[in-house]
Image (tube, rainbow, N blue to C red):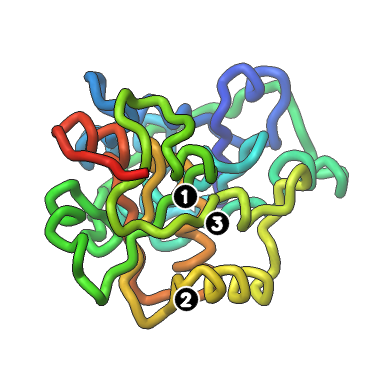
Amino acid sequence: MSKLFLFRKVSDYAKVHIDGAVNIDVKKLYKPGAVKYVLKSSNEISAIMGSSGISNTNKIVIYGTGSGKSSGRLYWILKYMGCKDVKILNGHLKAWRTVRGKVTKIKPKITPVKFTAVPVASYYASTAYVKKNLKNPKIILVDNRSSNEFKGVTGETAKKGHISGAVHFDYAKVMNLPAQTLKSKAELVKMFNAAGITKNKEIILYCESSVRSGIVFLALKSVLGYPKVRVYDGAVYEWTAKGNSLVK
């Protein structure tokens, strides 16, 4: 199967991208409406991916710029949609250019293909699922925002704080910044164990919109092999929009 590179930011893509890369704007995968960043239906996502020349059977390599959080978000979306072979380019475009990988401004010719989403239910958590399991001792709810957001000092929603019972683990801890590389397996094991985020529990990740949770999903599920990891897609935006409270 062909290998595809996906780039997130439209303006950056126009300036330079890895030769052969197609561009996916993650924001096009979200529903319009008052609650930000909630995923569109699997059929809608299938249509967007297929029209971009991406099949669910391709080998897919994602890269981007900045902190890597949007690449992590796209990684989780594709894995949730049932793509088997998805990776993130460690170090992103910066690392590619360091080894003199070929870059260009020319967009590749795109041939639409069929993308058949088969959502993996065990990777997804709804508001109802989170509410049902708030006191479940077998589940750990993990807030991937900054410390100030978790404490309710800052935050984009009118209600501030975190979901009751959640533990804090800032998504940025899994990354070496500004290199945009993932920390070593040994470092990740040490950090997650210290936070009480252990393999014997089911993990539910969230942030304000769950954009930041994707890279933590990759670290837990794909690098460390945690058996049960979900992302609460609606996250704080949806939680508070549905009238649920937060604690500080």
Instruction: Say what secondary structure mark 1 lies in.
Output: loop
Residue closest to the eye, 233 or 170: 170
* Amino acid on which disc 1 is placed: Asn
SS type, badge 2: loop
Q: In which quarter of the image is the C terminus?
A: top left
Measure the alpha-carbon separation of dots 1 and 2. Answer: 19 Å
The type of residue carrying mark 3 is: Lys
In which quadrant of the rendered view does residue 5 lie?
A: top right
Dot 3 corresponds to which residue? 87
Q: In this view, does 237 lie to the left or right of 21?
A: left
Q: Is residue 112 above or below residue 78?
A: above
Q: Name the residue under label 2.
A: 225
N-terminal label among 3 and 1: 3
Helix, strand or loop under label 3: strand
Q: How far apart are marks 3 and 1 (CA)?
A: 21 Å
The label on residue 144 is: 1
Answer whether labels 3 and 1 touch (C-beta < 8 Å). Answer: no
Q: Residues within 10 Å of mark 2 (few under 14, many from 20)?
A: few
Instruction: Name the residue at 38% across, 33% down.
Output: 112
